[in-house]
Image (spheres, rainbow, N blue to C red):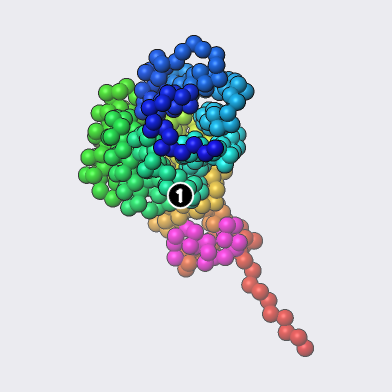
C-alpha cells in the first residue's frame, strides 16, 4: 500500500513516524537532539535511526561515514518492510557519495527512488539523486529529476527539506547559465530555511547568491555574503566560513580592490583545517589573483603553481589545469614569453582542448603584441611552439589557427614566414588533376 506524505502529519507515533521525526531533526541541523532521542535497542528501526544520525554526524565532521555505512547495511538486513529498507538504502548511498564513490551511490539511490511506494522516501531519494547529478555538473539531468520532485514539494512536512529542493534547483539553473531562475529559486529556498530556523542552510544559500551576483552587482554580492560570514562564524562552521571568505575575496577582485581581496583570501586559507585541504587549490588560486593585481608577481606565481601541484596530487587534473590557466590569464603581461610557454605546456598536458584554447587565445595576443627585438630576446623557438600547437589543433589551417590564437590571419601568416620548421604543419592546397 502506498503511504502518502500527509500520513506523516498525523500524531500517531508508529515506528516509521519516529524514524522520520529523528531524520527531520538531523535535516534541520539538530543532530545532537536527534542523538539524544536514540535508544540502545537493537530492533530494526532503532538500528535505522542510529545509522541516519551517524550519517549526519559524519557529514558534519563528528564521525566516520564507514561506521554509518556499517549501521545502515545492518539495518537493510534487519528491516522487513521494503520501504524502510529503501530509506536505509538512500542514506547508505549518500555515505558512498561522501566517500567519493558516486557510481555506487547512484545505483542505490536511483533504485530506491524507483522501487519505493512511500512518497516521502521517494522525495528524499529524488532530491539526493539530483545532488549526485549536480556534483557531476550534470545540471540538465538534475533539473529533470527535480521536475519529478516538484509536485510533491508543498506536501513535505519539513521546511528544510522543502528549501533544499529550491536550493538544488537554483544550483542547477546556475550551472545551466539561467541566472534569473537561479536567483528566484535561491530566494524561495531562503523563505523555507527561515521558516525552519535553519541558519546554516540560510548561510549556504546566501553564499551561493553572492557568487551569482559577483559578475552582476557586487553591492548585492556584499549584501548576501556578509550575513553568511556572520552566521558561519557564530555556529563555528570552519569550512563554510572559509568558503564564504573566498567568495568575499572574489567580490573584491571583481571590484579591483586587490588589497582587501588579499586579506579575505588569507582568511579563507587560515580557516581551512588539515582535513579540509581539498579546497586549498581553489583558495590559493584566488589569492594568486590578488597578488597578481598587487603586482606581487613571485608570490602570485608561487600560489598558482602550488594550487596546481596540490590539485594534481589529489587527482584533480582539471582543477590543476584551471590553476595554470588562471596564472596565464592573470600574469600574461607580467611574465616573459618563455615563462608563459611553460605554463601553457602544463595546461595542454592536464586539461581538455577547451581549456587549451583559452590559454592559446591569451598567448596569441601576447605573441601578437611582441615586437621583433623582444622575440629575438626571448627566443623565436617559443613563438614557434605556440604557433605549431595552434596549427596542430587547426589541422594545418592558418585561418582556424588564427581564430584559436585570437589574432588576425595576416599577422599569423606573416609570423609563419619566419618559421620554416612549421611548413610541414601547414595544410597543403588541393591539386587539381586535369584529365586529358
To which residue does mark 1 refer? 147
Q: Nearer the viewer, residue 277 or 27?
A: 27
Residue 364 falls in image quadrant? bottom left
Residue 333 to residue 103: above or below:
below
Q: Residue furthest bottom?
A: 436
Which residue corresponds to the image point at 39% horizontal and 48% vertical from the top-left?
Answer: 174
Is 227 displayed left or right of 3 in the figure?
left
Quadrant location of the N terminus? top right
Q: Residue at x 55, y 32 (%)?
A: 83
Picture coordinates of residue 94, whole percent (x, y):
52, 31
Q: Position of residue 258 (x, y in %)?
A: 27, 38
Which picture quadrant has residue 249? top left
On the picture, is 100 further left or further right than 248? Answer: right
Q: Nearer the viewer, residue 310 or 154?
A: 154
SS under mark 1? helix
10 Å crowding of disc 1: few (<14), some (14-19), many (20+): few
Location of the C terminus (image quadrant): bottom right
At a point 37% along the width and 18% down the height, the residue shown is: 33
* Image coordinates for residue 322, horizontal then vertical, percent: 46, 42
Q: Main secondary structure of the magenta part?
A: helix
Residue 155 in view of the camera: yes
Q: Position of residue 395 (x, y in %)?
A: 60, 61
The answer to whether residue 409 is above or below residue 88 is below
Name the outermost residue toward the right.
436
- Magenta region, residue range: 391-408
Q: Is residue 168 placed above or below 67 in the rendered structure?
A: below
Is residue 12 left or right of 86 when viewed as pictured? left
The residue depicted at 55 percent of the width and 14 percent of the height is: 42
The reply to whether the magenta stretch includes residue 348 is: no
Residue 393 among those drawn in magenta: yes
Amino acid at each position: 500500500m502506498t503511504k502518502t506524505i500527509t500520513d506523516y502529519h498525523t500524531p500517531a507515533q508508529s515506528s516509521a513516524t519516529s524514524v522520520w521525526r529523528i531524520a527531520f531533526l538531523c535535516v534541520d541541523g539538530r543532530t545532537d537532539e536527534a542523538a539524544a532521542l536514540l535508544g540502545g535497542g537493537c530492533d530494526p528501526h532503532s538500528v535505522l535511526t542510529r545509522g541516519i544520525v551517524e550519517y549526519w554526524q559524519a557529514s558534519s565532521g563528528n564521525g566516520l561515514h564507514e561506521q554509518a555505512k556499517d549501521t545502515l547495511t545492518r539495518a537493510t538486513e534487519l528491516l522487513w518492510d521494503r520501504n524502510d529498507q529503501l530509506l536505509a538504502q538512500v542514506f547508505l548511498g549518500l555515505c558512498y557519495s561522501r566517500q567519493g564513490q558516486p557510481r555506487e551511490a547512484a545505483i542505490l539511490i536511483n533504485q530506491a527512488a524507483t522501487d519505493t511506494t512511500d512518497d516521502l522516501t521517494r522525495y528524499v531519494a529524488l532530491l539526493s539523486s539530483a545532488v549526485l547529478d549536480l556534483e557531476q555538473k550534470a545540471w540538465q539531468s538534475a533539473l529533470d529529476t527535480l521536475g519529478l520532485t516538484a509536485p510533491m514539494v508543498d506536501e513535505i512536512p519539513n521546511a528544510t527539506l522543502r528549501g533544499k529542493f529550491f536550493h538544488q534547483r537554483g544550483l542547477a539553473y546556475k550551472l545551466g547559465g539561467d541566472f534569473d531562475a537561479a536567483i528566484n529559486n535561491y530566494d524561495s529556498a531562503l523563505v523555507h530555511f527561515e521558516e525552519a530556523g535553519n541558519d546554516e542552510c540560510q548561510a549556504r544559500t546566501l553564499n551561493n547568491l553572492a557568487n551569482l551576483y559577483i559578475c552582476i552587482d557586487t553591492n548585492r554580492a556584499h549584501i548576501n555574503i556578509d550575513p553568511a560570514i556572520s552566521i558561519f562564524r557564530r555556529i563555528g562552521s570552519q569550512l563554510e566560513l572559509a568558503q564564504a571568505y573566498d567568495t568575499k575575496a572574489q567580490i573584491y577582485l571583481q571590484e579591483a580592490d586587490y588589497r582587501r581581496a588579499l586579506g579575505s583570501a588569507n582568511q579563507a586559507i587560515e580557516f581551512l583545517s588539515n582535513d579540509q585541504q581539498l579546497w586549498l587549490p581553489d583558495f590559493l588560486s584566488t589569492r594568486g589573483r590578488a597578488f597578481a593585481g598587487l603586482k606581487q608577481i613571485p608570490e602570485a606565481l608561487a600560489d598558482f603553481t602550488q594550487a596546481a601541484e596540490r590539485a594534481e596530487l589529489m587527482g584533480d587534473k582539471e582543477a590543476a589545469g584551471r590553476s595554470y590557466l588562471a596564472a596565464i590569464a592573470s600574469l600574461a603581461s607580467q611574465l616573459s614569453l618563455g615563462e608563459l610557454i611553460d605554463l601553457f605546456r602544463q595546461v595542454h598536458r592536464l586539461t581538455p582542448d577547451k581549456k587549451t584554447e583559452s590559454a592559446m587565445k591569451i598567448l596569441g595576443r601576447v605573441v601578437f603584441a611582441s615586437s621583433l627585438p623582444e622575440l629575438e630576446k626571448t627566443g623565436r623557438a617559443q613563438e614557434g611552439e605556440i604557433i605549431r600547437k595552434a596549427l596542430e589543433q587547426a589541422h594545418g589551417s592558418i585561418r582556424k589557427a588564427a581564430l584559436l590564437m585570437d589574432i588576425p590571419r595576416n599577422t599569423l601568416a606573416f609570423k609563419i614566414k619566419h618559421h620554416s620548421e612549421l611548413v610541414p604543419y601547414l595544410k597543403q592546397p588541393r591539386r587539381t588533376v586535369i584529365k586529358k
